[in-house]
Image: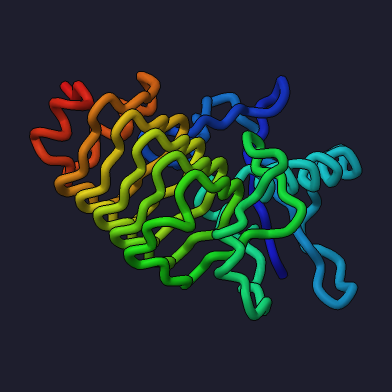
Amino acid sequence: MAALSIPLSQNGFSRSFYSAKRPQLISPLAPSLAPITCRAAVDGAEPKESLSPCKHIGTVACGLLAVWTLTNTTPVIAATQRLPPLSTEPNRCERAFVGNTIGQANGVYDKPIDLRFCDYTNEKSQLKGKSLAAALMSEAKFDGADLSEVVMSKAYAVGASFKGVDFSNAVLDRVNFGKANLQGALFKNTVLSGSTFDDAQLQDAVFEDTIIGYIDLQKLCVNPTISPEGRAELGCR
């Protein structure tokens, strides 16, 4: 028997909020909350507890809340669940040299760009200026590569290595750099709009003339691996 207990306000649904620093689900409970317990029968057996005096309404409410809870998981979990299986295309790593030419800002593509586990170490010519919208780059290696002027919108680069990469004049829009190695990366005149760097390594990264929003800057400055010079360039307080 499976059970899901979800508190409901007597006047409607209680709202949930996400923390700005860490995506945690917080449900403030007031003394007037009336819990509704959902019971699922197994093998056709009747549940031992009734839902509420209005059994049908309670069932519908629990169903709606269960769907709402599953569809509003933390961004990290949701992103992990959405990742497709690793592409079996023989030349999938070469897709980076072609890039994507449609829907750059929204990460729309005619064919997935799966660069996971690909090795572009010291690639100096074929990646410059390419569009890698919605590219899957987990665990890929770009150490020493020239990624200047690239457009990476909604790219997923968790755990990738970008040591010493040149991101000059690049647009890194809503890129997930979680746990990525960006030691010595050059972000000169780089747009960092909505990109996240949770647990990323940013030792000796250069942020000269970086273009970044105030909220994004606050989140980036929390990273303890940024050098004093980098913090000064960013204007971290």
Residue 167: where, in percent of width, then height?
36, 43
Residue occupying the far front of the picture = 125
The relative height of residue 44 versus residue 196 in the rendered view (above or below) is below
Q: Quadrant of residue 24?
A: top left
The relative height of residue 181 versus residue 233 in the rendered view (above or below) is below
Decide which of 44, 237 is in the foreground and name it. 237
Total labels: the figure holds 0
Tell whether 29 sits left or right of 188.
Answer: right
Q: Quadrant of residue 233?
A: top left
**Quadrant showing the N terminus:** bottom right
Residue 103: where, in percent of width, then height?
70, 39
Asked if residue 20 shows in the view, the reply is no
Asked if residue 118 shows in the view, the reply is yes
Q: Quadrant of residue 7?
A: top right
The relative height of residue 142 versus residue 107 in the rendered view (above or below) is below
Residue 16: where, in percent of width, then height?
56, 31
**Quadrant showing the C terminus:** top left
Decide which of 44, 116 is in the foreground and name it. 116
Tell whether 58 sits left or right of 104.
Answer: right
Residue at figure coordinates x 71%, y 20% from the top left: 11
Tell whether 204 sits left or right of 189.
Answer: left
Identify the colour scheme used: rainbow
Residue 65: where, in percent of width, then height?
73, 42
Residue at figure coordinates x 52%, y 41% from the top left: 151
Decide which of 33, 111 is in the foreground and name it. 111
Residue at figure coordinates x 60%, y 27% from the top left: 15
Residue at figure coordinates x 62%, y 28% from the top left: 14
